[in-house]
Amino acid sequence: MKKNNKDITKRVRLTENECRKIMKEAKKKNMNFSAYVRYAAKLDKNMDPEFIKAIYKLANEINYIGHNINQVVKNNNSKLYSEIDKARLMEYMRILNEKVESLLKQNGYKQNSSH
């Protein structure tokens, strides 16, 4: 039988809003308050499974857009791609930038203002 090493009890004062936020996040992960606090103490934001999943999804979209860019560049002089194709590619890039910005914001990162 595994020994329970949780022998420290802490009393914490929270505002209603803080408590509500913690309970909301705990519920999302099907955890009680204590389990979520322990989870959050160990959490490395960069290793959050949902964050990693979102990064992989964005990486696939970036690869898709990169492929399109390569095709446009290769065939620019041969007129295989129209202005509509180029506009569509620019729209894909705009959408991707919005998704990256949203993902960063959701995970507490500030948008890099250099672009």
Image (cartoon, rainbow, N blue to C red):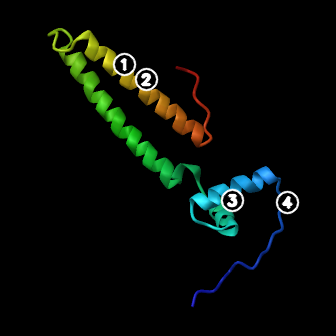
Which label's residue is closer to the chain start, 3 or 1? 3
Q: Is residue 84 above or below residue 64?
A: above
Q: Are marks 1 and 2 in contact (CB under 8 Å)?
A: yes
Q: Are marks 2 and 3 in contact (CB under 8 Å)?
A: no
Q: Nearer the viewer, mark 2 or mark 3?
A: 3
Amino acid type at circle 4 is: Arg
Point 63% across, 56% down: residue: 25
* Circle 3 SS class: helix
Amino acid type at circle 1 is: Met
Q: Which residue is mark 1?
A: 90
**What crowding class fits label 3: few (fewer than 14 Cα within 10 Å), some (14-19), or many (20 or more)?**
some
47 to the left or right of 96: right
Q: Which residue is mark 3?
A: 23
Q: Nearer the viewer, mark 3 or mark 1?
A: 3
Q: Which residue is mark 2?
A: 94
Which label's residue is closer to the chain start, 4 or 1? 4
The percent position of residue 68, horizontal first and vertical second, equals 26, 25
Q: Are marks 4 and 2 in contact (CB under 8 Å)?
A: no
Amino acid type at circle 3 is: Met
Point 53% across, 35% down: residue: 102
